[in-house]
Image (tube, rainbow, N blue to C red):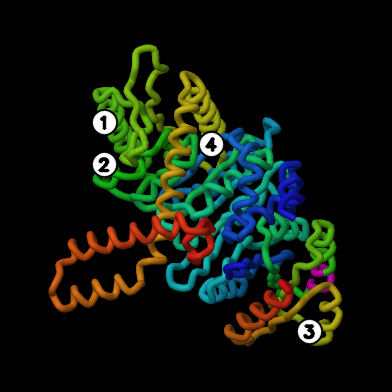
Amino acid sequence: MSKHPVRILIAKPGLDGHDRGAKVIARMLRDAGMEVIYTGLRQTPEMIAEAALQEDVDLVGLSILSGAHTSLVPRIREKMNECGLEAIPLLLGGIIPQDDYESMQAYGVASIFGPGTRADAIVSEIETIVSKSKQ
Amino acid sequence: MVAQLTRSLLEGDRPALARALTRIENHDERAREIIASIFPATGNARIIGITGAPGTGKSTLVNEWVKVIRAEGEPVAILAIDPSSPITGGAIMGDRVRMQEHAGDAGVYIRSMASRGKLGGLANATRDAIRVLDAAGFPYILLETVGTGQSEVDVAQLAHTTIVVEAPGLGDEVQAIKAGLLEIADIVVLNKADRPGAAQTLRSLQQMLALGSSRMEADGITHHTGDHGVNMTAEKKPGDAAVWIPPIIQTVAREGDGVEELWQLVKSHIEYLQVANHMVDWNRRQLAQELKERLENQWLERFRWHMNGQAFQQQVDRLAEGSIDPFTAVDELLNHTLAEVLESSTALTGTHKGGGAR
């Protein structure tokens, strides 16, 4: 198969209105040659699952700063699974306490990027995840 | 596997549709098979192109418009093209940000597509992506181009109805009388018509379009004209339906103002195409153009295989020595390559990698 750009959905679920981080990430991934579908603020789990389905993305990146990840991530996973997207990995960015890392993995969160993560580390992590999930 | 995928696709299965579009976009080896098997099921959708400069409000207009179409109960697909970075190949596609009101509506399918190096406002795979959406049973497909400048007019080749969206304050009268976008419009939308300067922009657009239509009447030419060489002009014969003169409509998409009227105009344009065989002509023209493009690409691909060979290097050497001029060099190479291509075409396929059909 010919090599093609990674397609990734970047969404900001929940109610907090700070999307600068998500935009910086989107820009960074674009500069790494990826195709980023940016959906903006206040996405419901249903909206995220539906967008991931229609856009046929390789993975879904979520930016969550509000601490609501423990309720949002399970619901997003559930809606995605209902759409047949069990195999699509999630990425988390934002403020996620270390203690929650393990429980998040159970919902198919392949990686968590906290504040201060280097751009090249995020890019190479994503490339690794995508090449693994395509095998 | 392709058979299963296309069967599900034709039944309207959304995951199958999403996967098929990805295969088409990636020029996957199965893309050709997909198109071959769905081709008989295409040709039913009405394709409406929306183009215009960045920031004129195309996505917002589409969002409001989809509400109007959905109120009538028909499903609608949106194909939104965004530019790929020429440097990295990456893209940010943000059209969904302004189209969120349709989340949860199974009758709306939105797909973002990066241009992937193609100029002209569309992506290489756009034509086939439209076919896939058509086969999936969408009666209306809205094709939103990248924010265009002055020459990105490819959309008119794929859309039955081309809408050019303008907004006040983007340029003076000289911008309006330059060649380009306005020439391909079937309908001109002056969006953000509540903004200062709207009246002046409206006047410029009216003058521009009046000039255009009187010229066409004088020449006896129907609206879709172009220099693409595939019978893009048609003599106006007695008994033909009236020539379509592109109307201007003012909208404030953010408020939904004028969008219903726009939809009625689009419908009357579709009706106009359906009378007097305009649609049949349109389809033939479109297919002729596609065939021409695909032939050109295939020829180019075959020639390219021969382009770096020994004969080519010899000509470079001779050019560098000054013993030949560039025109003669090309003539000689063309004759040489043509002979080689013909030879390889008649030989068993597969002897020349890249020489046969992909």
**Label 4 belongs to which residue?**
B257
Residue B235 image point, x, y percent? 32, 23
Badge 2, how many Cα within 10 Å: few under 14, some, many 20+?
A: some
Q: Secondary structure at mark 3?
A: loop
**Label 2 belongs to which residue?**
B177
Badge 3, how many Cα within 10 Å: few under 14, some, many 20+?
A: few
Mark positioned earlier in the residue sequence (1 or 4): 1
**Label 3 belongs to which residue?**
A97
Residue A58 image point, x, y percent? 68, 67
Question: Is the residue B3 above or below the residue B233 in the image?
Answer: below
**Label 1 belongs to which residue?**
B211
Which subunit holds the residue at mark 1? B
Q: CA distance from mark 1 to mark 4?
A: 28 Å
- Left or right, B150 with reference to B121: left
Q: Are marks 1 and 4 in contact (CB under 8 Å)?
A: no
Which subunit holds the residue at mark 4? B
Q: Secondary structure at mark 1?
A: helix
Q: CA distance from mark 1 to mark 2?
A: 10 Å
Type of residue at label 4? Asp
Do marks 4 and 2 share a subunit?
yes
Corner quadrant of residue B37? top right
Type of residue at label 2? Ile
Q: CA distance from mark 4 to mark 2?
A: 27 Å
Residue B202 image point, x, y percent? 35, 36
Which segment did they paint magenta?
A68-73
Residue in front for this viewpoint, A10 or B326: B326
- Residue at image coords 59%, 66%: A36
- Residue at image coords 38%, 39%: B184
Q: Secondary structure at mark 2?
A: helix
* Quarter of the image where the C terminus of chain B is located: bottom right
